[in-house]
Image: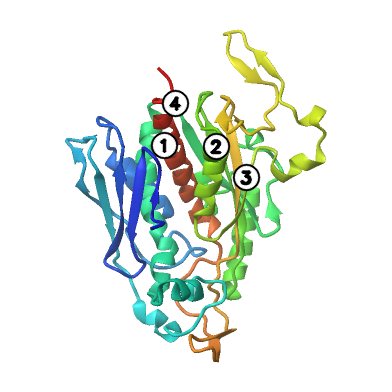
Amino acid sequence: MGSTYGKIFKIATFGESHGVGIGVIIEGCPAGVQFDTDFIQSELTRRKPGQSRITTQRKEADEFEVLSGVFEGLTTGTPIALIIRNEDQRSKDYSHIAAQYRPSHADYTYQVKYGVRDYRGGGRSSARETAARVAAGALAKLLLAQVGVRIQAYVSQVGSIKISKSYKELDLTETENNAVRCPDPVIAQQMFDYIDGIRKNGDSVGGVVNCVVEGVPAGWGEPVFDKLHAELGKAMLSINAVKGFEYGSGFEGVEMLGSQHNDAFYVDSENGVHTRTNHSGGIQGGISNGEDIYFKVAFKPVATIMQDQASIDQHGDVAVVQGKGRHDPCVVPRAVPIVESMAALVLADFYLRNKTSRV
Protein backbone atom coordinates (compact mmCIF):
# COMPACT_ATOMS: atom_id res chain seq x y z
CA MET A 1 0.00 0.00 0.00
CA GLY A 2 1.38 3.34 -1.08
CA SER A 3 4.75 2.01 -2.24
CA THR A 4 4.01 1.57 -5.96
CA TYR A 5 3.85 4.07 -8.81
CA GLY A 6 3.00 3.91 -12.51
CA LYS A 7 0.50 2.32 -14.88
CA ILE A 8 2.82 0.63 -17.42
CA PHE A 9 6.34 1.58 -16.32
CA LYS A 10 5.69 0.58 -12.71
CA ILE A 11 7.93 0.64 -9.66
CA ALA A 12 7.57 -0.70 -6.14
CA THR A 13 10.16 0.36 -3.57
CA PHE A 14 10.98 -1.49 -0.36
CA GLY A 15 13.23 -1.21 2.70
CA GLU A 16 13.93 1.07 5.64
CA SER A 17 16.65 3.50 6.66
CA HIS A 18 18.29 1.11 9.14
CA GLY A 19 17.23 -2.23 7.70
CA VAL A 20 19.31 -4.59 5.57
CA GLY A 21 18.87 -2.39 2.56
CA ILE A 22 16.48 -0.60 0.24
CA GLY A 23 15.46 -1.53 -3.25
CA VAL A 24 13.05 -1.35 -6.12
CA ILE A 25 11.20 -3.70 -8.46
CA ILE A 26 10.57 -2.27 -11.93
CA GLU A 27 7.88 -3.74 -14.16
CA GLY A 28 6.91 -2.74 -17.68
CA CYS A 29 10.33 -1.68 -18.90
CA PRO A 30 10.57 -2.81 -22.53
CA ALA A 31 13.11 -5.45 -23.47
CA GLY A 32 16.30 -4.36 -25.19
CA VAL A 33 17.02 -1.16 -23.24
CA GLN A 34 20.76 -0.77 -22.71
CA PHE A 35 21.28 -1.25 -18.97
CA ASP A 36 24.12 1.22 -18.39
CA THR A 37 25.39 0.30 -14.93
CA ASP A 38 27.91 3.15 -14.88
CA PHE A 39 25.20 5.71 -15.56
CA ILE A 40 22.83 4.26 -12.97
CA GLN A 41 25.63 4.24 -10.39
CA SER A 42 26.55 7.84 -11.24
CA GLU A 43 22.96 8.90 -10.59
CA LEU A 44 23.00 7.18 -7.19
CA THR A 45 26.32 8.86 -6.41
CA ARG A 46 24.72 12.27 -7.04
CA ARG A 47 22.13 11.50 -4.34
CA LYS A 48 24.27 9.63 -1.81
CA PRO A 49 25.10 11.10 1.62
CA GLY A 50 28.47 12.46 2.68
CA GLN A 51 29.14 14.52 -0.46
CA SER A 52 30.30 17.65 1.36
CA ARG A 53 30.18 19.27 4.78
CA ILE A 54 26.72 20.70 4.02
CA THR A 55 25.20 17.22 3.69
CA THR A 56 24.66 14.41 6.18
CA GLN A 57 27.90 12.66 7.07
CA ARG A 58 26.38 9.18 6.91
CA LYS A 59 28.75 7.16 4.73
CA GLU A 60 26.97 4.99 2.19
CA ALA A 61 28.52 3.91 -1.11
CA ASP A 62 24.99 3.32 -2.45
CA GLU A 63 26.27 0.64 -4.81
CA PHE A 64 23.43 -1.35 -6.31
CA GLU A 65 23.04 -5.01 -7.15
CA VAL A 66 20.92 -6.39 -9.98
CA LEU A 67 18.87 -9.38 -8.87
CA SER A 68 16.81 -9.97 -12.01
CA GLY A 69 15.57 -8.66 -15.34
CA VAL A 70 18.92 -7.91 -17.04
CA PHE A 71 20.93 -10.20 -19.30
CA GLU A 72 24.12 -9.39 -21.19
CA GLY A 73 23.64 -5.67 -20.59
CA LEU A 74 20.07 -5.46 -21.85
CA THR A 75 16.69 -5.42 -20.12
CA THR A 76 14.76 -8.62 -20.79
CA GLY A 77 11.21 -7.30 -20.44
CA THR A 78 10.73 -9.18 -17.16
CA PRO A 79 10.65 -7.57 -13.68
CA ILE A 80 13.92 -5.86 -12.77
CA ALA A 81 14.92 -6.06 -9.11
CA LEU A 82 17.64 -3.80 -7.69
CA ILE A 83 18.92 -3.65 -4.12
CA ILE A 84 21.15 -1.15 -2.32
CA ARG A 85 22.47 -2.51 0.95
CA ASN A 86 22.78 -0.26 4.00
CA GLU A 87 26.31 -0.11 5.37
CA ASP A 88 26.56 2.76 7.87
CA GLN A 89 23.53 2.50 10.15
CA ARG A 90 23.93 3.90 13.65
CA SER A 91 20.65 2.83 15.20
CA LYS A 92 21.83 3.76 18.69
CA ASP A 93 21.65 7.40 17.60
CA TYR A 94 17.85 7.05 17.71
CA SER A 95 17.30 5.04 20.89
CA HIS A 96 16.53 8.25 22.81
CA ILE A 97 13.44 8.94 20.65
CA ALA A 98 12.03 5.40 20.69
CA ALA A 99 8.98 6.63 22.62
CA GLN A 100 9.06 10.30 21.60
CA TYR A 101 7.38 12.14 18.77
CA ARG A 102 9.85 14.38 16.94
CA PRO A 103 8.35 17.70 15.77
CA SER A 104 7.32 17.68 12.09
CA HIS A 105 8.34 14.04 11.58
CA ALA A 106 6.16 11.04 10.73
CA ASP A 107 6.60 9.47 14.19
CA TYR A 108 3.12 10.29 15.48
CA THR A 109 1.24 9.64 12.24
CA TYR A 110 2.94 6.27 11.64
CA GLN A 111 2.20 5.25 15.24
CA VAL A 112 -1.47 6.18 14.87
CA LYS A 113 -1.85 4.45 11.49
CA TYR A 114 0.05 1.22 12.17
CA GLY A 115 0.22 0.93 15.94
CA VAL A 116 3.96 0.27 15.59
CA ARG A 117 6.85 2.20 14.07
CA ASP A 118 10.50 1.77 13.28
CA TYR A 119 12.04 4.75 15.07
CA ARG A 120 15.56 4.13 13.68
CA GLY A 121 16.10 6.99 11.30
CA GLY A 122 12.40 7.16 10.60
CA GLY A 123 12.24 3.66 9.13
CA ARG A 124 10.15 3.65 5.97
CA SER A 125 9.48 7.41 6.19
CA SER A 126 13.19 8.19 5.86
CA ALA A 127 14.49 9.98 2.77
CA ARG A 128 16.88 7.04 2.44
CA GLU A 129 14.04 5.36 0.53
CA THR A 130 14.56 7.84 -2.33
CA ALA A 131 17.77 6.07 -3.39
CA ALA A 132 15.56 3.30 -4.77
CA ARG A 133 13.61 5.87 -6.78
CA VAL A 134 16.84 7.31 -8.20
CA ALA A 135 17.95 3.85 -9.34
CA ALA A 136 14.63 3.29 -11.10
CA GLY A 137 14.61 6.85 -12.43
CA ALA A 138 18.04 6.32 -13.97
CA LEU A 139 16.66 3.42 -15.98
CA ALA A 140 13.69 5.57 -16.98
CA LYS A 141 16.17 8.23 -18.18
CA LEU A 142 17.93 5.64 -20.33
CA LEU A 143 14.59 4.69 -21.90
CA LEU A 144 13.63 8.32 -22.50
CA ALA A 145 17.02 9.16 -23.99
CA GLN A 146 16.17 6.80 -26.85
CA VAL A 147 13.41 9.23 -27.90
CA GLY A 148 15.38 12.42 -27.22
CA VAL A 149 13.95 13.45 -23.86
CA ARG A 150 16.37 15.30 -21.54
CA ILE A 151 15.73 16.19 -17.89
CA GLN A 152 17.75 18.77 -15.95
CA ALA A 153 17.07 19.99 -12.41
CA TYR A 154 18.98 22.55 -10.37
CA VAL A 155 18.79 24.47 -7.10
CA SER A 156 17.27 27.92 -7.66
CA GLN A 157 16.73 29.02 -4.05
CA VAL A 158 18.02 28.40 -0.53
CA GLY A 159 16.24 30.35 2.18
CA SER A 160 15.87 33.87 0.74
CA ILE A 161 18.86 33.51 -1.59
CA LYS A 162 17.57 32.89 -5.09
CA ILE A 163 18.35 33.02 -8.79
CA SER A 164 16.38 35.74 -10.55
CA LYS A 165 17.06 34.47 -14.09
CA SER A 166 14.96 31.96 -16.02
CA TYR A 167 16.46 28.62 -16.98
CA LYS A 168 16.97 29.87 -20.54
CA GLU A 169 19.37 32.54 -19.25
CA LEU A 170 21.47 30.06 -17.26
CA ASP A 171 24.24 27.68 -18.24
CA LEU A 172 22.81 24.49 -16.78
CA THR A 173 26.05 22.62 -17.48
CA GLU A 174 27.41 24.47 -14.41
CA THR A 175 24.92 22.71 -12.11
CA GLU A 176 27.16 19.80 -11.13
CA ASN A 177 30.25 22.00 -10.65
CA ASN A 178 29.49 22.94 -7.05
CA ALA A 179 28.17 21.26 -3.90
CA VAL A 180 24.87 23.16 -3.92
CA ARG A 181 24.01 22.23 -7.53
CA CYS A 182 23.20 25.81 -8.45
CA PRO A 183 24.16 26.80 -12.03
CA ASP A 184 25.11 30.36 -11.02
CA PRO A 185 28.60 30.07 -9.43
CA VAL A 186 28.37 33.35 -7.50
CA ILE A 187 24.96 32.61 -6.00
CA ALA A 188 26.02 28.99 -5.40
CA GLN A 189 28.83 30.18 -3.12
CA GLN A 190 26.41 32.43 -1.23
CA MET A 191 24.08 29.47 -0.77
CA PHE A 192 26.91 27.22 0.38
CA ASP A 193 28.11 29.72 2.98
CA TYR A 194 24.56 30.26 4.23
CA ILE A 195 23.87 26.52 4.57
CA ASP A 196 27.21 26.02 6.30
CA GLY A 197 26.35 28.73 8.83
CA ILE A 198 22.95 27.16 9.43
CA ARG A 199 24.67 23.80 10.00
CA LYS A 200 27.06 25.27 12.56
CA ASN A 201 24.07 26.68 14.46
CA GLY A 202 22.44 23.25 14.58
CA ASP A 203 19.51 24.40 12.45
CA SER A 204 18.16 23.72 8.96
CA VAL A 205 16.81 25.65 5.98
CA GLY A 206 14.60 24.92 2.97
CA GLY A 207 14.90 25.69 -0.71
CA VAL A 208 13.57 25.29 -4.24
CA VAL A 209 14.57 22.89 -7.01
CA ASN A 210 13.69 23.85 -10.59
CA CYS A 211 13.38 21.23 -13.31
CA VAL A 212 13.35 21.54 -17.11
CA VAL A 213 12.32 18.76 -19.49
CA GLU A 214 13.24 19.12 -23.16
CA GLY A 215 12.32 16.94 -26.09
CA VAL A 216 8.89 15.69 -25.02
CA PRO A 217 6.76 15.62 -28.17
CA ALA A 218 3.20 16.83 -28.30
CA GLY A 219 0.60 14.29 -27.21
CA TRP A 220 1.89 12.77 -23.96
CA GLY A 221 -0.65 12.83 -21.15
CA GLU A 222 -4.23 11.90 -20.42
CA PRO A 223 -7.41 13.92 -19.91
CA VAL A 224 -9.23 14.64 -16.66
CA PHE A 225 -7.68 12.78 -13.70
CA ASP A 226 -4.40 11.59 -15.25
CA LYS A 227 -3.23 14.91 -16.63
CA LEU A 228 0.51 15.09 -17.19
CA HIS A 229 1.01 18.02 -14.84
CA ALA A 230 -1.19 16.38 -12.19
CA GLU A 231 1.01 13.26 -12.26
CA LEU A 232 4.16 15.37 -12.10
CA GLY A 233 2.70 17.18 -9.10
CA LYS A 234 1.83 13.92 -7.38
CA ALA A 235 5.29 12.52 -8.05
CA MET A 236 7.04 15.61 -6.67
CA LEU A 237 4.79 15.86 -3.63
CA SER A 238 5.60 12.22 -2.82
CA ILE A 239 9.23 13.22 -2.18
CA ASN A 240 10.15 13.71 1.48
CA ALA A 241 10.03 17.34 2.71
CA VAL A 242 8.24 18.69 -0.39
CA LYS A 243 5.67 21.35 0.44
CA GLY A 244 4.89 22.92 -2.91
CA PHE A 245 4.74 22.32 -6.66
CA GLU A 246 4.04 24.71 -9.51
CA TYR A 247 4.53 24.40 -13.25
CA GLY A 248 4.60 26.93 -16.06
CA SER A 249 3.68 30.43 -14.91
CA GLY A 250 2.48 28.98 -11.60
CA PHE A 251 1.34 31.46 -8.99
CA GLU A 252 2.86 34.37 -10.91
CA GLY A 253 0.29 33.75 -13.62
CA VAL A 254 -2.52 35.11 -11.45
CA GLU A 255 -1.08 38.61 -11.87
CA MET A 256 -1.30 38.43 -15.66
CA LEU A 257 -4.21 39.13 -17.99
CA GLY A 258 -5.45 36.48 -20.38
CA SER A 259 -4.16 38.54 -23.30
CA GLN A 260 -0.69 38.37 -21.72
CA HIS A 261 -0.81 34.77 -20.55
CA ASN A 262 -2.14 33.05 -23.69
CA ASP A 263 0.49 31.16 -25.69
CA ALA A 264 -0.03 31.92 -29.40
CA PHE A 265 0.65 29.12 -31.87
CA TYR A 266 2.73 29.41 -35.04
CA VAL A 267 4.24 27.08 -37.65
CA ASP A 268 8.00 27.18 -38.09
CA SER A 269 9.99 26.83 -41.32
CA GLU A 270 9.95 23.02 -40.99
CA ASN A 271 6.17 22.88 -40.50
CA GLY A 272 6.55 22.27 -36.77
CA VAL A 273 3.87 23.68 -34.45
CA HIS A 274 5.17 25.82 -31.58
CA THR A 275 4.01 28.56 -29.22
CA ARG A 276 5.60 32.01 -29.11
CA THR A 277 5.54 32.03 -25.32
CA ASN A 278 5.38 29.16 -22.87
CA HIS A 279 3.38 30.25 -19.85
CA SER A 280 1.61 26.88 -20.10
CA GLY A 281 4.81 25.11 -19.12
CA GLY A 282 4.65 22.74 -22.08
CA ILE A 283 1.31 21.22 -21.05
CA GLN A 284 -2.22 22.15 -22.15
CA GLY A 285 -5.32 20.21 -21.23
CA GLY A 286 -3.11 17.80 -19.32
CA ILE A 287 -1.27 16.82 -22.53
CA SER A 288 2.20 17.91 -23.67
CA ASN A 289 2.27 20.46 -26.51
CA GLY A 290 5.91 19.96 -27.57
CA GLU A 291 7.39 22.93 -25.72
CA ASP A 292 9.73 22.68 -22.73
CA ILE A 293 8.09 21.39 -19.56
CA TYR A 294 9.32 23.32 -16.55
CA PHE A 295 8.32 23.36 -12.89
CA LYS A 296 9.45 24.21 -9.37
CA VAL A 297 9.48 22.06 -6.23
CA ALA A 298 9.60 23.65 -2.76
CA PHE A 299 11.32 21.81 0.10
CA LYS A 300 10.77 22.67 3.75
CA PRO A 301 13.63 22.93 6.26
CA VAL A 302 14.78 19.47 7.35
CA ALA A 303 12.76 18.54 10.45
CA THR A 304 15.70 17.10 12.41
CA ILE A 305 17.82 19.87 13.91
CA MET A 306 20.68 19.71 16.37
CA GLN A 307 18.75 21.62 19.03
CA ASP A 308 16.50 20.51 21.89
CA GLN A 309 12.80 20.78 21.05
CA ALA A 310 9.70 20.53 23.21
CA SER A 311 7.32 17.69 22.34
CA ILE A 312 5.46 14.75 23.91
CA ASP A 313 6.01 11.00 24.11
CA GLN A 314 3.66 8.17 23.13
CA HIS A 315 2.04 8.32 26.55
CA GLY A 316 1.14 12.00 26.14
CA ASP A 317 3.72 13.20 28.63
CA VAL A 318 5.83 16.28 28.00
CA ALA A 319 9.24 15.41 26.54
CA VAL A 320 12.33 17.16 25.26
CA VAL A 321 13.59 15.80 21.96
CA GLN A 322 17.35 16.06 21.79
CA GLY A 323 19.03 16.75 18.46
CA LYS A 324 21.32 13.85 17.60
CA GLY A 325 22.43 11.85 14.57
CA ARG A 326 23.61 12.79 11.08
CA HIS A 327 21.31 14.92 8.97
CA ASP A 328 21.31 17.38 6.09
CA PRO A 329 21.04 21.04 7.15
CA CYS A 330 19.45 21.64 3.72
CA VAL A 331 18.05 18.85 1.58
CA VAL A 332 17.91 20.58 -1.83
CA PRO A 333 21.45 19.81 -3.12
CA ARG A 334 20.81 16.06 -2.81
CA ALA A 335 17.19 16.45 -3.93
CA VAL A 336 18.16 17.50 -7.47
CA PRO A 337 18.65 13.91 -8.77
CA ILE A 338 15.52 12.80 -6.89
CA VAL A 339 13.40 15.42 -8.67
CA GLU A 340 14.89 14.39 -12.01
CA SER A 341 14.24 10.72 -11.29
CA MET A 342 10.60 11.22 -10.36
CA ALA A 343 10.08 13.31 -13.49
CA ALA A 344 11.69 10.52 -15.54
CA LEU A 345 9.42 7.89 -13.99
CA VAL A 346 6.33 9.93 -14.82
CA LEU A 347 7.43 10.61 -18.38
CA ALA A 348 8.56 7.04 -19.06
CA ASP A 349 5.12 5.85 -18.01
CA PHE A 350 3.36 8.39 -20.22
CA TYR A 351 5.66 7.57 -23.13
CA LEU A 352 4.59 3.92 -22.97
CA ARG A 353 0.97 4.80 -22.32
CA ASN A 354 0.94 7.09 -25.35
CA LYS A 355 2.12 4.24 -27.58
CA THR A 356 -1.16 2.44 -26.82
CA SER A 357 -3.52 5.40 -27.29
CA ARG A 358 -3.90 5.33 -31.05
CA VAL A 359 -3.42 3.03 -34.06
Q: Quadrant of the N terminus?
A: bottom left
Image-quadrant location for residue 350: top left
Please say whether residue 285 is visible from this viewpoint.
Answer: yes
Q: Which residue is mark 4?
A: 148
* Residue at position x 54%, y 91% in the image: 317
**Which mark is nearer the camera, 2 or 3?**
2
Secondary structure beneath dot 3 equals: loop
Q: Which residue is mark 2?
A: 227
Alpha carbons under labels 1 and 2: distance apart: 12 Å
User: Does residue 277 sit above or below 104 in this rendering?
Assistant: above
Could you tell me how far apart the alpha carbons at marks 2 and 4 are, in whole angstroms? 22 Å
Q: Quadrant of the C terminus?
A: top left
Name the amino acid type tagged 3. Asp
SS under mark 1: helix
Gap between marks 1 and 3 measured at Cα: 32 Å
Q: Residue tagged by mark 1?
A: 349
